């Protein structure tokens, strides 16, 4: 009789794991049952702002694999089923059928928790008003479309992080009047140092976005159940549509209630093989803590890249293989209109908070040879350990062709390189792509001369 793997959560980590296991184990060898409380599996939530902005043609374009496609591969996906509890001693999960309301106990031999993360929603008065939402699911995107079709013209985005920028851009492209309300004094405040964030703020203002920095939200006002304004300490901001993007928290409550270890950051504790501290229980994706390669600390970094990699790793291990997840640097990239924004490793602020003797060195450069059409200005900030010259992090803000250079610096970070070593790297050159001294080399050389 085949053993059974139960997976809680049918998105990136869970279904990547299921797919990997099925590549290595037949149905006769291992049964896979995945419970997903929504109606969908395996879709690209990162594409939602671009769906709202009209750059993605349809919601179906964001779906990687449907439940039916997973079932055809021998994975028993049960949508609209929610796992309410884990019984470690009995090796069972309590599953609630959300359509019928019936509950049942399902046995597992191995259990994977891939419950993801939920958007942070403070208990503000009026938050349940129609027109106040997050943008985390395809249903949320559909709700935005309904509001636009109903005549929404004034949008307020609460939060100026990744989602805030991307949603603001999308709504602006749809012709709305957009206001961004942010408690911090700059956009991308948790991602960039203030000196780099200034350029982002300038680009947002130039595009016509009303920026309200240093402004705390206190609630929402409504008329007939529909939002009419965002209440702030500086006064109300009129709105027909409000999108809240305040970051996420790992969904670790189910694990915690079962006695599975949860760390100080709020994520489920796992080793590099994605095993929890409880036998036969594994975890992966946005619900787990990861090892930060620069600080050695356990952190929650909710990115689709990590979730999919962790799914592949844990799937390999569940099938009897041997794979390890190497940790995270927090490498990420986004854009606002034509401005590309990227970071990896530690900001100067984060490095100093971690007790490192760090210095930030900023360089201005061009994305192409200055004489070649389409050359765009860019800024690179390198965060370097004083004395040793070890690269600790980097940030890039600039025009087309700037952002993906962050991957070179992420590779250098991954391998523990100094800025002097980065400055000597053999990078490609041709006028349409780079000056003869690539901006990465220029920035590394300048940093090496300072530290």
Image (spheres, grey):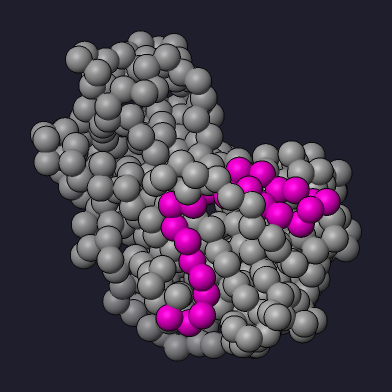
Tell me residue 421's x, y (percent).
Answer: 77, 77
- Residue in the picture at 71% in, 48% down: 86
The answer to whether residue 443 is left or right of residue 242 is right
- Residue in the picture at 28% in, 66% down: 60
- Residue in the picture at 38% in, 72% down: 68
Q: Is residue 75 magenta?
A: yes
Tell me residue 51's x, y (percent).
Answer: 28, 57
Above or below, 406 against 124 in this view is below
Total numbered labels: 0
Above or below, 40 against 173 in this view is below
The answer, for residue 284, to whether it is visible in the render is no
Q: Is residue 394 magenta?
A: no
Give the residue at the far right of this rendering. 387
Q: Quadrant of residue 369?
A: bottom left
Q: Which residue range is magenta in the image? A: 72-95
Quadrant for the N terminus in the image: bottom right
Above or below, 163 against 72 in this view is above
The answer to whether residue 23 is left or right of residue 208 is right
Q: Quadrant of residue 202?
A: top left
């Amino acid at each position: 009789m085949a053993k059974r793997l139960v997976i809680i959560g049918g998105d990136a980590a869970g279904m990547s794991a299921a797919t990997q296991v099925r590549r290595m184990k037949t149905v006769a060898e291992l049964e896979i049952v995945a419970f997903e409380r929504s109606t969908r599996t395996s879709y690209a939530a990162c594409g939602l702002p671009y769906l709202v902005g009209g750059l993605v043609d349809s919601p179906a374009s964001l779906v990687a694999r449907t439940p039916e496609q997973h079932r055809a591969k021998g994975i028993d996906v049960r949508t609209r089923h929610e796992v309410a509890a884990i019984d470690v001693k009995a090796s069972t999960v309590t599953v609630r059928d959300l359509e019928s309301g019936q509950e049942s106990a399902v046995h597992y031999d191995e259990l994977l928790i891939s419950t993801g993360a939920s958007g942070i929603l403070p208990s503000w008065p009026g938050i349940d008003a129609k027109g106040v939402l997050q943008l985390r699911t395809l249903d949320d995107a559909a709700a935005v479309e309904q509001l636009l079709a109903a005549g929404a013209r004034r949008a307020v985005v609460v939060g100026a992080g990744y989602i805030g920028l991307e949603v603001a851009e999308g709504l602006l492209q749809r012709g709305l009047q957009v206001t961004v309300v942010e408690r911090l004094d700059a956009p991308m405040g948790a991602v960039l140092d203030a000196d780099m964030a200034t350029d982002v703020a300038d680009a947002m203002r130039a595009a016509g976005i009303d920026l309200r920095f240093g402004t705390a939200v206190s609630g929402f006002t409504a008329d007939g159940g529909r939002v009419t304004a965002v209440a702030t300490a500086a006064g109300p901001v009129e709105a027909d549509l409000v999108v809240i993007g305040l970051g996420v928290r790992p969904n670790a409550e189910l694990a915690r209630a079962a006695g599975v270890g949860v760390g100080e950051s709020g994520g489920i504790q796992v080793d590099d093989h994605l095993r929890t501290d409880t036998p036969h229980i594994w975890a992966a994706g946005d619900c787990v803590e990861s090892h930060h390669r620069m600080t050695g600390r356990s952190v929650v970094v909710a990115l689709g890249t990590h979730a999919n990699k962790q799914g592949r790793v844990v799937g390999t291990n569940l099938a009897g293989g041997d794979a390890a997840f190497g940790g995270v640097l927090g490498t990420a990239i986004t854009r606002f209109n034509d401005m590309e924004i990227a970071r990896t490793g530690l900001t100067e602020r984060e490095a100093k908070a971690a007790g490192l003797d760090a210095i930030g060195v900023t360089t201005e450069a061009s994305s192409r040879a200055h004489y070649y059409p389409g050359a765009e200005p860019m800024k690179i900030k390198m965060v370097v350990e004083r004395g040793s010259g070890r690269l600790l992090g980097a940030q890039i803000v600039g025009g087309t062709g700037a952002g993906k250079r962050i991957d070179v610096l992420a590779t250098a970070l991954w391998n523990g390189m100094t800025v002097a070593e980065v400055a000597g790297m053999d990078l490609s050159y041709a006028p349409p792509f780079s000056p003869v001294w690539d901006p990465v080399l220029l920035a590394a050389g300048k940093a090496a001369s300072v530290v």
